[in-house]
Image: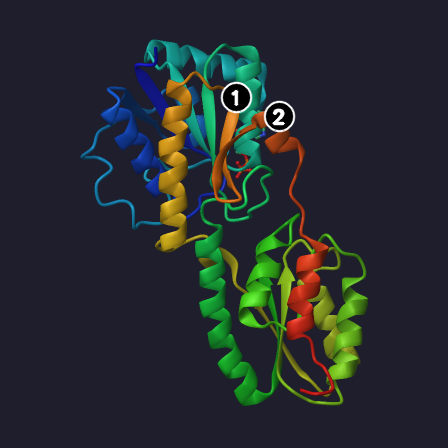
């Protein structure tokens, strides 16, 4: 029987992580399980940085971005010796089970630990990238999209006043989810994503078409696009000198801010389910939400089947956004 749960947030922070911490803590306490917050992800586990969490300590955090438990990257946890140190600290603290909130790296770490030691671990997907298999959405993704939409709406005001072409770079090293969905929501004219080839050629073709219209445009670019946002923009400035081309890199504003209602709800649902899963003896799984239902995805598949941008979705986004002769 589980008496004490340890909870940590790891990897890139995401808005809504606090709502998940709150949900886990409250549900555990309701089920007479005590909760210990492990500070700064796996680093805190190795350093023995533990703080008890109570109903009181998770009050007033549902609306805050970032994570009250802090997050960190911990190279030492990738080694057997590092993880051994972590498990010894858990034993000392009498922690029976772990809830880890993070992205695929965090689940990789949890999976290694679960393979080596018999400790129940349940994961909650918390990353703005939405690239985890087994869940339709990850915590933080919706807030990130909303932040981009409000930023791009403002950029557009300048773009249309000065007839400029804006390259807007958004996050997404390996995945174009953020670029695709924010591009659709912002009415971007084209969307450049890492999953597709020849993004320079695509831009060139678009601008050649645009030259006949001389209208302002938004080109949404995921940061992981092979050719690089800056390099594409510089080349286009030379080739299409008739356009006033600018680049706006949105950067870290995409990670921060108060979580959207949708992220708060998702985080709460996943947090509650994580505790129930542990109580019913589940281990080595991530809690996901798919087709409106909660589901348990084994860490092994959540980390292996990396979710990629959907070509069909991109076609929809572009067929609405891209210039047509009837514009
Ligand atoms: P995210 O969880 O957002 O994908 P990272 O990829 O940085 O973030 O992973 C977070 C942490 O998880 C790393 O700093 C490391 O401690 C741990 N981790 C990542 N990959 C592994 C792995 N293959 N084995 C053990 N631990 C890992």
Question: What is the residue that sits farthest to the left in this orientation?
Answer: 56
Out of 31 and 143, give the one closest to the viewer.
31
Q: x, y (%) of residue 82?
A: 52, 17
* Residue 187 visible in the picture: yes
Looking at the image, residue 12 sits to the left or right of residue 28; the answer is right
Looking at the image, residue 122 sits to the left or right of residue 109; the answer is left
Question: What is the residue that sits farthest to the front in this orientation?
Answer: 292
Out of 36 and 125, give the one closest to the viewer.
125
Within 8 Å of ligand 1, the CB of disc 2?
A: no
**Local crowd size for mark 1, using a 10 Å CA cut-off: few (<14), some (14–19), many (≥20):** many
The residue shown at (49%, 67%) is 149
Looking at the image, residue 163 sits to the left or right of residue 43; the answer is right
The residue shown at (30%, 37%) is 22
Out of 70 and 287, give the one closest to the viewer.
287
The residue shown at (64%, 74%) is 321
Question: Tag 2, which secondary structure?
Answer: helix
The relative height of residue 57 versus residue 47 in the rendered view (above or below) is: below
Q: Which mark is residue 284?
A: 1
State yes or no: discs 2 and 1 in contact (Cβ < 8 Å). yes
N-term mark: 2 or 1? 1
Looking at the image, residue 145 sits to the left or right of residue 15; the answer is right
Query: What is the image's colouring?
Result: rainbow
- Where ligand 1 lies, by quadrant? top right
Q: Report the number of numbered marks.
A: 2
Q: Which residue is mark 2?
A: 300
């Amino acid at each position: 029987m589980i008496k004490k749960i340890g909870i940590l947030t790891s990897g890139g922070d995401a808005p809504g992580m606090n709502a998940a911490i709150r949900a886990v803590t409250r549900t555990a306490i309701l089920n007479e399980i005590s909760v210990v917050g492990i500070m700064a992800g796996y680093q805190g586990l190795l350093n023995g940085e533990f703080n008890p969490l109570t109903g009181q300590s998770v009050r007033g955090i549902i609306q805050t971005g970032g994570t009250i438990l802090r997050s960190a990257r911990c190279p030492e946890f990738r080694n057997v010796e590092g993880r051994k140190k972590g498990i010894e600290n858990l034993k000392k603290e009498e922690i029976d089970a772990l809830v880890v909130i993070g992205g695929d790296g965090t689940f990789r770490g949890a999976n290694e630990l679960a393979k080596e030691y018999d400790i129940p671990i349940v994961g909650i997907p918390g990353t703005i990238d939405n690239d985890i298999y087994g869940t339709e959405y990850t915590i933080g993704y919706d807030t990130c999209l909303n932040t981009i939409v409000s930023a791009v709406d403002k950029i557009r005001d300048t773009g249309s006043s000065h007839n400029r072409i804006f390259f807007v770079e958004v996050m997404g090293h390996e995945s174009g989810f953020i670029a695709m969905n924010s591009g659709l929501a912002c009415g971007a004219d084209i969307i450049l994503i890492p999953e597709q080839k020849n993004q320079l050629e695509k831009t060139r073709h678009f601008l050649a078409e645009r030259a006949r219209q001389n209208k302002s445009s938004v080109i949404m670019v995921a940061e992981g696009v092979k050719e690089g946002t800056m390099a594409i923009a510089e080349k286009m400035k030379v080739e299409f000198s008739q356009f006033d081309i600018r680049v706006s890199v949105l950067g870290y504003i995409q990670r921060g801010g108060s979580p959207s209602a949708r992220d708060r709800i998702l985080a709460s649902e996943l947090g509650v389910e994580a505790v129930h899963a542990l109580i019913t003896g589940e281990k080595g799984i991530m809690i996901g939400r798919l087709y409106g239902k909660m589901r348990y995805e084994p860490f092994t598949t959540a980390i292996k089947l990396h979710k990629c941008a959907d070509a069909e979705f991109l076609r929809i986004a572009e067929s609405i956004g891209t210039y047509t002769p009837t514009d």
